[in-house]
Amino acid sequence: MPEQAMKSVGDVYLRNFTEQHLKLVEMESKAHRQINRCLQRNHHGIISLQHTRYHQVMLLAFGVQIVLEKQKRTPQE
């Protein structure tokens, strides 16, 4: 699992995600912190933005794979 090819947005990881994609997403959502609340998993296992289907179509068209990471990081030090 090459983490270099993944971009973290809160608890969501986007594969093959570039800064250009982030700018497009930020333009639509105004604050990408809200993306976490807008995400839903469809029956294909793809995490899509609930508020606008434009994001899902745009990201899939650019070859971005959206993955939901459910691991909670707890500092044990």
Image (spheres, rainbow, N blue to C red):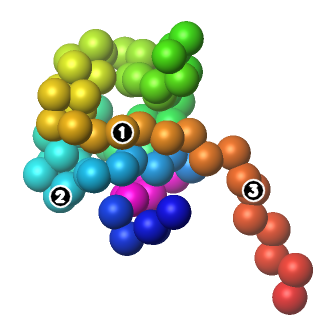
Density class for disc 3 (Cα within 10 Å; few <14, some 14-19, many ≥20) is few
- The kind of residue on which mark 3 rests is Lys
Q: Quadrant of the C terminus?
A: bottom right
Is 17 within the magenta?
Answer: no
**Toward the viewer: 52 or 15?**
15
**Closer-to-camera residue (45/72):** 45
- Drawn side of residue 76 relative to residue 68, left or right: right
Distance between the alpha carbons at the discs numbered 3 and 1: 21 Å
> Which residue is tagged 2?
19
Q: Looking at the picture, which amino acid does disc 1 mark?
A: Gln
Under circle 1, the secondary element is strand
Residue 55, percent across and down?
25, 25
Q: Residues within 10 Å of mark 1 (few under 14, many from 20)?
A: some
> In the figure, is residue 71 to the left or right of 41?
right
Marker disc for residue 72: 3
Residue 41 vertical placement versus 27 (above, below): above
Which residues are drawn in magenta?
Answer: 6-10
Q: Characterize the magenta stretch by its predominant secondary structure.
A: strand
Whether residue 1 sits left or right of residue 66 in the image: it is right
SS at mark 2 in the image? helix
Q: Residue at point 12% right, 51% down?
A: 20
- The answer to whether any part of residue 40 appears in the image is no
Quadrant of the image occupied by residue 57: top left
Residue type, label 2: Glu
Residue 64: horizontal and vertical position, in percent? 28, 40
In the image, which disc is placed on residue 65?
1
Task: Tell which circle, 1 or 2, labels the residue nearer the N-terminal end.
Answer: 2
Dot 2, crowdedness within 10 Å: few (<14), some or many (≥20)?
A: few
Q: Please, is residue 27 above or below residue 44 in the view? A: below
